[in-house]
Image (tube, rainbow, N blue to C red):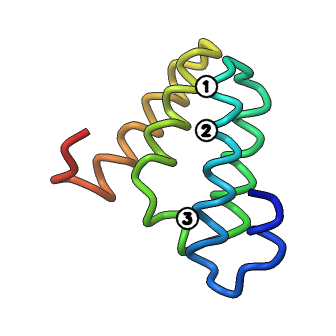
Amino acid sequence: FQWIIENASDRAVQAQAAARIGDLHLERLNYESALAAYYQALNGFQPESTRIPELMVNRGETLYQLRQFDRAQDEFEKFLTYFPSHPS
């Protein structure tokens, strides 16, 4: 995924790749690394990153697992604002 971030010409593809790095950490229950990767994806590839619903949901889940409940709630509310009709 890092190669895609560094070499893809499409910023939407780069944003997806950056989000997938966070997902890999989340799958391995490495929450601190997942949170850092999601932060980089969200802040490094705006506005494209705000069009990835899974990024917000998974970031919220990561914050929840880190027991940062207020921040997790904020992230889930942000998801609902950006994607009100999403089936998640």
- Foreground pick, 77 / 39: 39
SS label for mark 1: helix
Q: CA distance from mark 3 to mark 2?
A: 14 Å
User: In the picture provided, is 71 more to the left or to the right than 4?
Assistant: left
Q: How many marks?
A: 3
In the picture of the structure, the residue carrying the numbered disc 1 is 27
Kind of residue at badge 1: Glu
Amino acid type, label 2: Asp
- Gap in Å between the C-alphas at discs 1 and 2? 6 Å
Disc 3 vs disc 1: which is toward the camera? 1
Q: Going from the N terminus, do you reach mark 3 or mark 1 first?
A: 1
Residue 82 as seen in the image, left or right of residue 64: left
Crowding at dot 2, Cα within 10 Å, few <14 / some 14-19 / many 20+, comes out as: many
Label 2 SS: helix
Local crowd size for mark 3, using a 10 Å CA cut-off: few (<14), some (14–19), many (≥20):
many
- The residue labelled by disc 3 is 49
Q: Would you say the residues marked 1 and 2 are in contact, meaning their CB atoms lie under 8 Å apart? A: yes
Q: Name the residue located 77 percent from the left edge and 40 percent from the top edge.
A: 36
